[in-house]
Amino acid sequence: GQQVMQIPQYQHVQEGEDFTTYCNSSTTLSNIQWYKQRPGGHPVFLIQLVKSGEVKKQKRLTFQFGEAKKNSSLHITATQTTDVGTYFCAGGLGKFYFGSGTKLNVKP
Amino acid sequence: KAGVTQTPRYLIKTRGQQVTLSCSPISGHRSVSWYQQTPGQGLQFLFEYFSETQRNKGNFPGRFSGRQFSNSRSEMNVSTLELGDSALYLCASSLGTSGGSYEQYFGPGTRLTVT
């Protein structure tokens, strides 16, 4: 069945450093979504990518969808303590497969 | 616009019992999906309902079932509870229409503990 793998599992950075999480699928994805879950909270939708090679930016966050639509990445520039949380990618349509998430810790 | 609401927020049940969880989606959203979140398995898709019909199903045993009402509210039922069913159960609503955005809005979840 379809699997979405996400690395790294954990990332500890100093405030101001950059952060990247990667998502890989065993099959071609129709779209990919990214979510952020703060400790004790629920996942919050960040963005959806649909087109091959698509790049979208939200302030310090840059999202990419691979040319083959099998991988994606989320890059945060100059992390802040407010970026702390777990970032999930999810692929599918209706039936979504979530990656295992990357837990980001930012030290002030 | 009010967000997704889930009730109850916390629940403690005994092995063998059954439980029903409720989810009210965002007004106008016709798709409701249910997820199980555990530290070991992460976020796993249970099922999706759209216009009162189960449209997609994950790989969970038949003890897990759901339904959706005409007002889009959804319920999830777990029968014959097992210790391994202890988890955070999240529901997510979306427009769910073809060609539209499938961005999902999650509720706060129901924390189920099975003892």
Image (tube, rainbow, N blue to C red):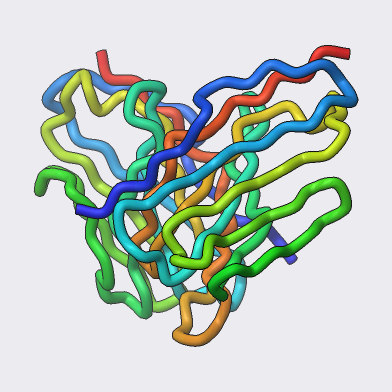
- Tell me what residue is drawn at x 83 percent, y 25 percent: A17
Question: Which corner quadrant of the image does residue B79 belong to?
Answer: top left
Return the residue nearer the eye: A1 or A39: A1
The vertical placement of B110 against B21, above or below, is above
Quarter in which the C terminus of chain A is drawn: top right
Q: Position of residue A10 (x, y in %)?
A: 56, 21
- Tell me what residue is drawn at x 63 percent, y 21 percent: A11
The vertical placement of B42 against A30, above or below, is above
In the picture as drawn, the residue positioned furthest to the front comes out as A67
The vertical placement of A68 against A43, above or below, is below
The vertical placement of A33 against A103, above or below, is below
Question: Which corner quadrant of the image does residue B57 belong to?
Answer: bottom left
Residue A97 falls left or right of residue B108: left
Return the residue nearer the eye: B2 or A37: A37
Q: Position of residue B40 (x, y in %)?
A: 34, 22
Return the residue nearer the eye: B82 or A17: A17
Return the residue nearer the eye: A86 or A30: A30
In the picture as drawn, the residue positioned furthest to the bottom comes out as B99
Question: Which corner quadrant of the image does residue A81 belong to?
Answer: top right
Q: Position of residue B80 (x, y in %)?
A: 11, 32
Residue B32 falls left or right of residue B107: left
Give the total of numbered labels.
0
- Tell me what residue is drawn at x 42 percent, y 71 percent: A30
- Tell me what residue is drawn at x 37 percent, y 52 percent: A25
Residue B28 falls left or right of residue B42: right
